[in-house]
Amino acid sequence: MSKTTHEALPTLKQEIRQKYEKFARWYDVMDGIPEILGVRRLRRRLLQRASGRVLEIAVGTGRNLHHYPKTCRVIAVDFSQAMLRVARRRADHLGLITPFLVMDAETLAFPDRCFDTVVSSLTLCTFPDPPPALREMARVCRADGRILLLEHGRSDVEWLGRWQDCRADRHAKALGCRWNRDPLGLARQAGLRLVAARRMFFGIIHVLEAMPSEPVPAHPA
């Protein structure tokens, strides 16, 4: 990544944060169609693989919370206070005791290898620089733990992928979501060890299960 791009990251992050502060109240309505079309079922299946002490990155409005096994101890982080307020209300409604913390996915304030499972869903599209965030997930995950990702990206149906490419800048400007990224390629770029990978819905939806790379990546200074 160029120096200019690095210098632009704080501004881009702030712009994305401001979008989600505004969207928080309406986010579940905006996200309702993918949920009805099958994303809810994929969440449920993927999160049944979670165990032990769980960190959910970019929890958003907390759609994942009621899909975790009851034995999981979940800590949830997001960089938007407004999204976390919605997630807290959801947790209260479900009777869940879940700590919610404001945190940047690229600089997690946790020690190395302290979680059994790390989860992130539909978030790689919003991170300005996804590989560092994925490496942070690996850093805080136990060596024998799991990183569970439910993501969307560029379709492998070429005409549809080209259509996404043509509208990617406009979509990102409006919603803070770059919908033509390659989640599988980003996971590999970050050095994650893939255990399982599936694509569906015209290759747009990715369900990934991974483990941390060796050795533990250094925490950013």
Image (cartoon, rainbow, N blue to C red):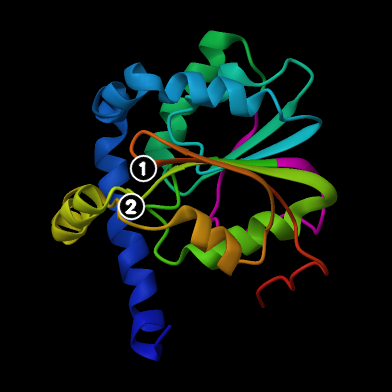
Please state, as top left, top right, bottom left or bottom right, where the C terminus lies in the image. Answer: bottom right
Q: Quadrant of the rendered structure where residue 193 is?
A: bottom right
Residue furthest bottom in the image:
3
Dot 2 and dot 1 residues touching (CB under 8 Å):
yes
Q: Residue furthest front?
A: 158
Is any part of residue 36 visible from this angle?
A: yes
- In the image as oriented, which residue stretches furthest toward the right? 144
Q: Is residue 107 visible?
A: no
For residue 89: magenta? no
Q: Is 139 above or below relative to 57?
A: below
Residue toward you, 143 or 63: 143
Give me the disc on residue 154: 2
Name the residue carrying label 1.
204
Which element type, helix, strand or loop, lies under badge 1? Answer: loop
Where residue 114 appears, as percent x and y from the top left, is 82, 49
Q: How many marks?
A: 2
* Residue lying at 30% horizontally and 51% vertically, measured from the top left: 179
- Whole-percent x and y of residue 194? 67, 52
Going by the numbered disc 1, the residue's amino acid type is Ile
Q: Amino acid at mark 2?
A: Arg
- Give the residues drawn in magenta, as a range: 98-117
Q: Quadrant of residue 165?
A: bottom left
Q: Which mark is residue 64?
A: none
